[in-house]
Amino acid sequence: MRAHPAGPLHGAFAPPPSAGMPPADLGALDPQVWPRSARRVDGELHLGGRAVTDLARAHGTPLFVLDEDDFRGRAADFATAFDGADVHYASKAFLCGQVARWIADDGLHLDACSGNELAVALAAGFPAERIALHGNNKSLVELQLAVDAGIGHVVLDSFDEIDRLVPMAAARVAAGGAPVPVLVRTTVGIEAHTHEFIATAHEDQKFGFSLATGDALTAAVRVIREPALHLSGLHSHIGSQIFDTAGFEAAAHRVVGLMGQVHQATGEVLEELNLGGGFGIAYLSDDDPVTPGDVARRLRAVIAMECAALDLPVPRLAVEPGRAIAGPGTVTLYEIGTIKPVRLGSGGQGAPQVRNYVSVDGGMSDNIRTALYDASYTCVLANRTSDAPPALCRVVGKHCESGDVLVRDLWLPSDVQPGDLLAVAATGAYCWSMASNYNYLLKPPVVAVREGAATEIVRRQTLSDVFALDAVLAGRPAPSPAVDQPAPEHPVGARS
C-alpha cells in the first residue's frame, strides 16, 4: 500500500498506532461511535430494543444488525439541514429493497453507481426522477436503462460517454420524449485529506473532466450544443470520510467559477450544483466528524458569496452524504472461535508482551475495509460484561490470509472465550456491499431492529445459492445443512 501525503491517519504505510492505555470501562459504548439505540441491559448489548444473543440465536453469525431509527434519523438530519436542497443517498454504501423504500419514503434522492444498483432501486419502486447514475465506464446497456427509466440525471464522466448517450437521447426526443438531463462531473484539483484510494478530485485519477486542462468547460459547452441533452448543472466530488469543510468550500469556489465560465461562453445559466460529499463518521472515539448543520451553513454561505461575485443566481444545491447515513447505525455480530496468545518479546521489565489473536466466524469476506484501506474499527464483548483485567487483542477472521484483520489492536477482557459474542461498530457502509465469497464463506444476513422488533431485510446466503452458479454443482444438495445455514438455535453467548 502506497503512503498518502495526508499522513498515517489516512492510510500511510506505517506501523499502526498502539492500542494505547486500556480504557476504564472495556464495555463502554461511546454514543458517537455506536448506534443511537445501543444500550447495556444487565451487561448485555441491546440494539433497537433487542438483546444481541437473541438476534444471534435466531439469525446466526456473522450478522449485520441495522438500527432502523438510527439510519432514518440520520437521513432526516441531512434532509433538515439541507432543506431546499437535494440529499442523495449513496447506494454503494449499502442498498437493498427495504433501504430503497425507506429512502424514497423519507424524500431523499439516490445515487446509483452501476446499472444493477439502478435496477435494484427501480425494482423497489424508487422514483426514477430522484435517481442519479454515476460511473466512469457506463455501458450502452446501463445508459439505455437510465434513459428508458427517465432518471433524474446521468452524471457524465467522459467524452466517450457523451458519444454513447447522444444517440439514445436523440431517439427518445424523436419519439416525443424530453431531452435527457445530465450533470458534468468536474475534477477540481482539490485532494481531500483521506486515504489515497478514496480521494477522487486530484488530477491523476479515473473520474471526471479536469477543470485545470479545460476539459470540463469543453464538455459542458458540447453538452449544451447537443439538443437531445439538457445540462442541468455541474457535479464535483473530492473524496470520502472527510472530517472538515475546507475542501468542500474550496471545491465550491472552483465549481461556481466554472459555472461562470459556462455562462460567459454560452449564455446558459446552470440551475444545479452537486458538491458531492463523503462526510466522515466516527469509527473510533477520537474521530470528530462535522455535523450536517455545520456543513450546510458553510456550503450555502460559500456558494452565495461566489455567485454574488460572478453575478449569477444561486443554483439548487445537492449533496451526497455517503457513509454518513448508513455507516453508524449498523453493528456486525461475530462469535469467537479460537483465541491464540502470541508472545511479542519482552516488555520494559523483562516480562513477555502478549497479543491475543481472537478469531471470529467472519472476516475479510464481510469487512474487507481494514485490509483494503487500513481502516480502523472498535468492538466490545457483547453478550456480557466482565471485570477481568484488560488484554491486548487483535480481532481476526477465519480466512486463509495473514491480512485478514478486522480490528488491529484493542483491549478486551482477558477472560473472553470461545462462544462469546463480539460486536464491531459502524459497519453499515461498504461492508455488506463489498462482501465476497472468499474461501466460499457465505454473505451474512442483514436484520433491521426497531422498538424490540427484528426484521430480516436481507437473508443469509446459502451454499445452495452458490452451487446454483456452478455449472457442475447446480441443483446438487449441499453436503451438510450445518454449512448451508445456521441452525435455528445457534449456540452463542453461552456464558452469562
Image (tube, rainbow, N blue to C red):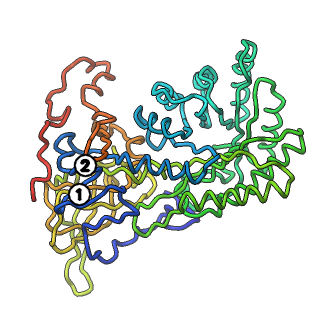
Question: 303 or 405: nearer the eye?
Answer: 303
Question: 364 or 141: nearer the eye?
Answer: 141
Q: Are marks 2 and 1 in contact (CB under 8 Å)?
A: no
Give the residue furthest to the bottom.
349
Question: 240 or 387: nearer the eye?
Answer: 387
Query: Residue 302's x, y, as percent?
Result: 72, 59
Q: Which residue is mark 1?
A: 45
Image-based side of 221 in relation to 101, left or right: right
Q: For residue 341, what is the image quadrant?
A: bottom left
70 vs 340: above or below: above
Query: Residue 70's x, y, as percent?
Result: 40, 51
Q: CA distance from mark 2 to mark 1?
A: 24 Å
- Mark 2 or 1, nearer chain start: 1
Question: 382 or 84: nearer the eye?
Answer: 84
Query: Residue 74's x, y, as percent?
Result: 47, 51
Count of numbered marks: 2
Q: Which residue is mark 2?
A: 398
- Quarter in which the C terminus is drawn: bottom left
| Secondary structure found at label 2 | loop
For discs 2 and 1, the disc positioned in front in the rendered view:
1
Seen at 31% across and 54% down, the residue is 402
